[in-house]
Amino acid sequence: MKRENMAKKSVKWLILLAILGCIPLITNSYHQYLVNLIFVNFLVSLGLAVLLGYCGQFAFASAAFLGIGAYTVGLSMVHLKLSYWLGLFLVVPVSLLFALMAGIIGLRLSRYYLAITTIAFTLAMRFFYVNGGGLTFGPSGFNIPVPKIWGFSFNSDHRLYYILLVVVTILSALTINILRSKVGRAFIAIRDKEEAAAAASINVKNYKMLAFIMCGVLGGVAGGLYSVVVGRITPDEFGMMQIIFHFMIVVLGGLGSITGLMISTIVITLLPELVRAVKEFQEIVYGGVIIIIILFAPSGLYGLIQKYSPFKFREKLQWKP
Amino acid sequence: MLFQILISGFVFGSCYSIVSVGMTTLYQATTVLNFSHGECVMLGAFIFYTLQILYGVSYPLAIVLTLMAALLIGTLMERSVFRRIMFAPHVNIVLATNGFLYFYRGLARLIWKSEPRFPASLIDVQPISLWGAVITSQDIAVLISVFILAAFFIWIFLFTETGLKMRAAAQSLRGAALVGINTNKFFSSIWATSLGAGAVAGILLGPIYSVHPEMGESIILRAFAAMTLGGFGNIGGAAIGGILMGIVENVVGYYFWSPLKEIVAYIVIVGVLIFKPTGILGAKKF
């Protein structure tokens, strides 16, 4: 019975993957670029969702890790002449190192202290990119070379999509499985009441550190993917706006819900494109939409859909405001 | 030269301390950390600039009108949004303030475009030379206004009923409501005061800092650093922290490497939190 269930489930996932794999057949280059952005944003917000939504740590570190990943890949390709793939693997230890650093400081802090420190961390990294001289190419940024494998170059948005599909699927499946295991339940326990979690013999320190590391590595790899999706990176992309962007995706998705995260990633990524026609109003519309959603759907987009949709959702929202 | 640096650091620091005192007042009474406060400073500066340069309104009137606009914006923010989500989780409140950040920045970009502007100096007297340092008229204006504001805040907090109510509500909202304090009315007046302080900082910073839609980001970071330095949620600490922040920033920028001026705030934040997390005057308990 159980085996049959699993077979059914894997068939379902395979069909979904096949559908996702067919997306490039129906899109033009611009639409494909947006789909790619959605994938990258999903990965990095998944990292933040682990830290903020599941573990309850008020840390805005994901934009910093996105930048670290993007610069690690870009600089290793430009300076060290490494291949893209090696660079993408290099991101993992580098972002792990930075996540450990952020975690060591972050473990001592809570609430607003942590929020402010992680914002400072992000902007200090941006300062380093701007003033790095020849190493980081200063405020105007630099172009990322096209990734190649055995003479096949991923030089279009449609081709890049398959790299994204593979990496994002593997990493997010891994993360979601971890969140459904003992580790994920420990995170939720820490979020709900730290003292109670410690009393239930959960090692709060280690699990918090693990959450920082998961956020760091997911954000770093997402940064590595982001660098080739946009093709040119500049320091200004990894500042305050990026922080708010990820934070917005996670909170509007309903903290601690993966389905909600998917929905809100799609909505928030496409929102600026929808209002692109009225370019001057872009930021105003953005801000207005955030405020309206917070006012009228305090448990996020997922909560809103759950409330008004005719279908029953299996996944319950875990953090009710 | 050192004296000149200290003086100009003190002038900038006074402006930061007005911003951080405004934020701390709000934080202490309502536990909302307003991420859009830097944008409110920017709006204050822009409104003052528009009235004074573009419409030729006289100085005192322009100041009064700017202040009234700030009080109105603060009340509106509280009435329309923050009153409704007062008991929501902190993440929602922080996201709502970030929504205002986007909104105001977009508004400023739409109305005033991106190039930096310089409003005229507040009072017009000859620069004074003092022990080799040149003190400009704007510096004098800032120093005088800061002393007036400081006196005003101390008077409000320690010697009036409003201050007493504020301290009561900060300790326990429910308790304050129970003894007959109208918390709703009180909250909108706190929001108005906080934004009013922000607008004053905008008026003072305008001529020395240049007014542009992105100025909010760098200002709010320095205000955060000042708040952390003085002990989070401690109003006196925020004032002292702001002044220290301005002086440290100027000294580091002059004697070490001038781009370093930009990240002094981050180094201060991280350093204070690692070595003395309660700040110099002790933090309000979370």
Image: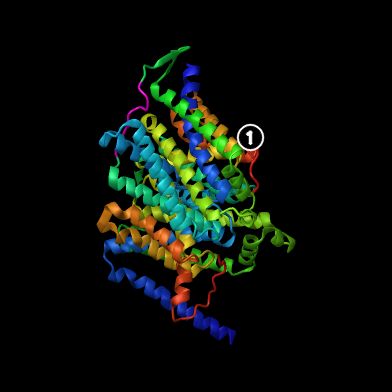
**Position of B140 compared to A151: left or right?**
right
Q: Nearer the viewer, residue A266 or B148?
A: B148
Q: In terms of secondary structure, what is the magenta stretch mainly?
A: loop
Residue A210, compared with residue A121, is above or below; it is below
> Which residue is found at the position 45% from the left and 44% from the top?
B195
On the image, the x and y values in percent for residue B75 come to 44, 50
Give coordinates of residue A73: x percent, y percent.
43, 49
* Residue at position x 39%, y 42% in the image: B68
What amino acid is labelled 1 in the image? Answer: Ile
Visible in this render: residue A61?
no
Compared to residue A113, the image places residue B263 above or below, namely: above
Compared across the picture, whether B161 is left or right of B82 comes to right
Question: Toward which corner of the image does residue A54 lie, by quadrant?
Answer: bottom right
What percent of the width, then of the height, locates residue B189? 49, 48
Examine the image and state in which quarter residue A211 appears: bottom right
Q: Residue B103: tell me if it is visible.
A: yes
Q: Within the magenta stretch, is there residue B116?
A: yes
Q: Position of residue A70 (x, y in %)?
A: 43, 50
Question: Which quarter of the picture shows residue B226?
Answer: top right
Q: Give the SS element for disc 1.
A: loop
Residue at 39% x, 48% y is A237
Q: Which residue is mark 1?
A: B280
Q: Is residue A269 above or below residue B160?
A: below
Q: How many marks?
A: 1
Task: Give the residue displayed 61% in from the left and 55% down from the top.
Answer: B180
* Residue segment shown in magenta: B115-124
In the image, B274 versus A103, the foreground residue is B274
Neighbours of disc 1 within 10 Å: few (<14), some (14-19), many (20+)? some
